[in-house]
Amino acid sequence: VKHLLGIKYITKEDIDLIFQTADNFKEVINRPIKKVPSLRDITIANLFFENSTRTKLSFELAEKRLSADVINFSAAASSVKKGETLIDTVNNILSMKVDMVVMRHPNPGAGVFLSKHINASIVNAGDGAHEHPTQALLDSYSIRERLGDVGGKNVVIVGDILHSRVALSNIYALKLQGANVKVCGPKTLMPKYIESLGVEVELNLRKALEWCDVANMLRVQNERMDISYFPSTREYTQQYGVDKALLNSLDKEIVIMHPGPINRGVEITSDVADSDQAIILNQVENGVAVRMAVLYLLASKIKQ
Ligand code: CP
């Protein structure tokens, strides 16, 4: 595999290898000297055509921990604003002898499109409402770390499934690893094809939480919606928001995840986000080791 464009294009064996490699890197980044020389001769461009905090910083840190040379590009401060196309932008960057591209883009399929026009290895850091493969990998890695395994676990993905690249990549990754997956949220935020992916739809939040071992609480993506997507934020929170009282009323302690950024008080309250049941910051921590593993494994193909 030369690129990581989506979880749809990889196998269970690929995920196992990424996690074994991430285990080694997690040990490395917890040492006093956090760097390894593995990618000393590799140059990576981080191309962000859409805003990011976690993914951008996590990739940059992963690359630096692997001793790669790193350049960062943010569309908002670039010649994209003067009308330069995606292919021209990337080809200009690649002509400076760049080996790998990490790209976030608002258009679904942007990474797949680019992979047909350039030679460099591409890692999809989120393409519109399509996929966010490294988020799904770090999410599964964090479930494995907390519960010992992903296979056989009941995982519910809650919220705005329709606009969520995190949901789609998580569904592919969880199903590959043998988890049972349900999605829960308002009908208007549920894609029509969802059941064809082998997941069950549960519209009732309490029933979903009673069933699950893990609840992955998605952000409501207001920026990808128009006014026709009911319910309102207030109605959404009443029906699909999780607070500590709701968690305490369940007869078991479930694990709470969130990809960030959190709308505190909308998807989850602060007393849930900051509780021991939540592994939200563990997800962020694990993102660096998982991304190191992805970059290391893809770079080994370039070096062959
Ligand atoms: N989880 C995630 O992709 O966060 P950012 O948008 O801040 O990168």
Image: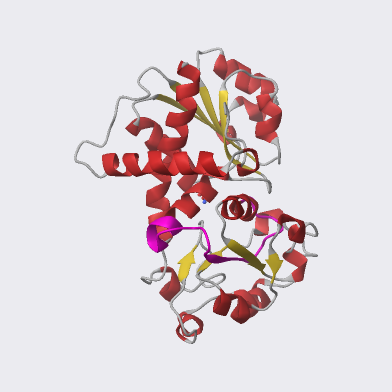
**Total number of numbered discs in the rendering:** 0
User: In the current view of this chain or complex, which residue is farthest to the left?
Assistant: 32
Its colouring scheme is: secondary structure
* Residue shown at the point (68%, 60%) measured from the top left: 161
* Residue shown at the point (64%, 45%) measured from the top left: 131
Left or right: 61, with 155 as reference point: left
Residue 223, relative to residue 77: is it above or below? below
Q: Is 69 covered by the magenta stretch?
A: no
Residue 301, relative to residue 210: is it above or below? above
Left or right: 14, with 27 as reference point: right
Residue 33 x/y as whole percent: 21, 36
Residue 279 x/y as whole percent: 41, 62
Residue 114 x/y as whole percent: 67, 27
Residue 219 visible at all: no
User: In the current view of this chain or complex, which residue is farthest to the bottom?
Assistant: 249
Q: Nearer the viewer, residue 222 or 216?
A: 216
- The span picked out in magenta is 143-165
**Quarter in which the N terminus is drawn:** top right
Left or right: 147, with 162 as reference point: left
Left or right: 250, with 30 as reference point: right
* Residue shown at the point (49%, 87%) measured from the top left: 249
Residue 73, relative to residue 199: is it above or below? above
Q: Is 162 covered by the magenta stretch?
A: yes
Q: Nearer the viewer, residue 132 or 174?
A: 174
Residue 194 x/y as whole percent: 74, 59
Residue 114 visible at all: yes
* Residue shown at the point (59%, 33%) measured from the top left: 75
The image quadrant that residue 207 belongs to is bottom right
The image quadrant that residue 62 belongs to is top left
